[in-house]
């Protein structure tokens, strides 16, 4: 009996000793830890693939347009009766370099001049002669008249001294004195004497050659009135030239093809001659020919017809003229769209990573809540439970707000994912077919074709204007 009491006392003392050694215990209410909501799927937006660059061609056609003379271009007071073939002599401008040039040349070489005494059988003169013959005129050979004029001039005075005026003779004496006094050298003296001689020779009409063209006309009329070579009419050609039409603009915008092309190419604009738009106009890349002449009745000096006409290259090209622009279309907002997508994906990834960290922290706190703990004192236990619940609560709040922000970001996808592609363009220089203008890069064959084109242009302008001689349109 006594022995049993001793044993019970020992067991109680041992239990008290054990309890006092382990401290205060924390026992969780559940051994199953809570879990945060599963992470949403991270779905980022793929980059958009822009359309490939596209090459296109704007093609314009300048159709053949026969040269048409208007009533404002001529006045005719001549009535040619059927069966009557009056004779006519051509008189070209004395200053060929200014009135009869190709490409606006300012010299009188055979290459640049339409009319050349040295080779009078040139294209321009022949076309005028042919046009006059078609109108019923007998065209007299100008070379014979030139020979006749030379004879008249040579016979006018007996020597060189008589061919200069009194005022010129005074200048001549002054130059001789300057040379003798050493004020000018031999070269300068000879040059000035030659210039004086050329400027002060008297013509067969007895006047100084201050106005060569009028003197030439009077000489030709006088020569045509007498002798074995006579003419009824004098065709005085005042101007015949073929020059570039660069100073005249060709309106590109008003072509129907241009307007349709602009409608089909979003973002393409009409404007200055730049690489990113269609030019509103371009310099006309071809030639124009102008012809001015008058017909004089040699017997009475009356002007019976006068005309002036201008035509351009499309009147001498029956196949028309093609103008093309090579246009490259490319996407201009590709970088903007994909950089916006990239920025969005970066934000989404950052928010997802943040949500992932908060979720992991919250799940760890939930696990901690299910673990048994022992504390030395009751106060330690109380503080532990309070801090744990506070951490869980704040982390749950952070998790909830982060999850909401993530889902909201998923919904607020950037507008650039459906934005229309914007286009820009590179517009090439206009290509003209056939090639109309001479340049150093042209082949000899191409230059020959251009020369033929100029000749055709000369024929067109001269024929069209001369056809109005004898017209009933009396202005």
Image: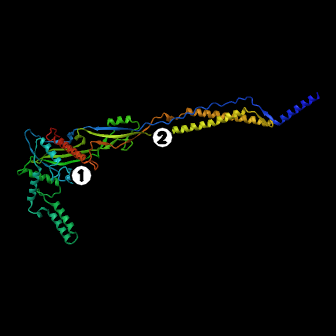
Q: CA distance from mark 1 to mark 2?
A: 53 Å
Question: What is the x, y in percent for residue 53?
Answer: 41, 38
Indicate left or right for 361 with 64 as reference.
right
Question: What is the x, y in percent for residue 112?
Answer: 21, 51
Q: Quadrant of the C terminus?
A: top left
Indicate left or right for 35 with 164 as reference.
right
Q: Residue furthest bottom?
A: 181
Q: Residue furthest left?
A: 228
Which residue corresponds to mark 2? Answer: 335
Mark with earlier residue (1, 2)? 1
**Which type of secondary structure does the marked residue at label 2 adopt?**
helix
Task: State the residue in front, 84 or 117.
Answer: 117
In the rendered structure, find residue 270 and report the number of the disc placed on it: none
Which of labels 1 and 2 is toward the front?
2
Indicate left or right for 454 with 373 as reference.
left
Which residue corresponds to mark 1? Answer: 105
Q: Quadrant of the N terminus?
A: top right
Question: What is the x, y in percent for residue 416?
Answer: 50, 36
Indicate left or right for 302 with 41 as reference.
left
Q: Residue at x 25, y 40 (%)?
A: 314
Q: Residues within 10 Å of mark 1 (few under 14, many from 20)?
A: some
Task: State the residue in front, 240 or 329.
Answer: 329
Instruction: Determine which quarter of the picture holds residue 40.
Output: top right
- Please name the colour scheme applied to the rendered image: rainbow
**Which type of secondary structure does the marked residue at label 1 adopt?**
loop
Q: Residue furthest top?
A: 1
Question: What is the x, y in percent for residue 44?
Answer: 54, 35
Count how many numbered circles sit on residues in the image.
2
Task: State the residue in front, 280 or 75.
Answer: 280
Q: Is residue 216 above or below residue 260?
A: below
Q: Residues within 10 Å of mark 2 (few under 14, many from 20)?
A: few
């Amino acid at each position: 009996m006594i022995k049993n009491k001793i044993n019970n006392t020992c067991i109680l003392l041992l239990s008290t000793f054990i309890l006092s050694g382990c401290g205060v215990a924390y026992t969780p209410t559940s051994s199953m830890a809570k879990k945060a909501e599963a992470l949403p799927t991270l779905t980022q937006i793929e980059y958009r693939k822009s359309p490939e660059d596209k090459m296109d061609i704007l093609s314009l056609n300048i159709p053949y347009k026969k040269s048409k003379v208007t009533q404002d271009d001529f006045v005719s007071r001549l009535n040619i009766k059927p069966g009557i073939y009056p004779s006519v002599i051509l008189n070209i401008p004395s200053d060929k370099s200014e009135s009869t040039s190709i490409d606006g040349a300012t010299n009188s070489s055979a290459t640049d001049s339409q009319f050349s005494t040295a080779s009078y059988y040139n294209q321009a003169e022949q076309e005028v002669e042919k046009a006059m013959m078609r109108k019923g005129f007998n065209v007299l050979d100008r070379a014979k008249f030139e020979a006749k004029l030379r004879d008249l001039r040579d016979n006018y005075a007996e020597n060189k001294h008589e061919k200069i005026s009194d005022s010129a003779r005074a200048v001549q004496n002054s130059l001789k004195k300057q040379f003798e006094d050493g004020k000018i050298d031999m070269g300068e003296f000879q040059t000035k004497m030659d210039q004086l001689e050329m400027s002060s020779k008297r013509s067969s009409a007895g006047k100084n050659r201050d106005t060569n063209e009028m003197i030439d006309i009077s000489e030709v009329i006088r020569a045509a009135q007498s002798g074995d070579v006579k003419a009824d009419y004098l065709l005085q050609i005042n101007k015949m030239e073929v020059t570039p039409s660069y100073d005249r603009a060709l309106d590109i915008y008003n072509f129907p093809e241009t307007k349709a092309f602009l409608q089909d190419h979003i973002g393409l604009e009409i404007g200055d001659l730049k690489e990113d738009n269609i030019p509103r106009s371009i310099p006309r890349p071809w030639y124009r020919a102008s012809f001015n002449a008058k017909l004089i009745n040699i017997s009475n000096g009356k002007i019976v017809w006068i005309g002036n006409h201008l035509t351009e290259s499309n009147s001498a090209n029956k196949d028309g003229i093609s103008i093309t622009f090579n246009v490259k279309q490319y996407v201009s907002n590709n970088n903007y769209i994909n950089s916006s997508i990239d920025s969005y994906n970066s934000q989404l990834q950052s928010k997802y990573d943040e949500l992932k960290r908060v979720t992991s922290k919250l799940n760890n706190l939930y696990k901690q809540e299910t673990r048994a703990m022992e504390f030395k004192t009751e106060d330690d236990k109380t503080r532990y439970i309070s801090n744990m619940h506070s951490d869980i609560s704040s982390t749950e709040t952070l998790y909830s707000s982060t999850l909401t922000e993530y889902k909201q970001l998923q919904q607020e996808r950037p507008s650039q994912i459906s934005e229309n592609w914007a286009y820009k363009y590179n517009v090439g220089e206009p290509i003209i077919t056939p090639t109309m203008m001479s340049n150093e890069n042209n082949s000899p064959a191409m230059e020959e074709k251009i020369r033929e084109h100029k000749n055709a242009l000369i024929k067109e302008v001269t024929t069209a204007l001369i056809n109005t001689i004898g017209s009933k349109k009396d202005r």
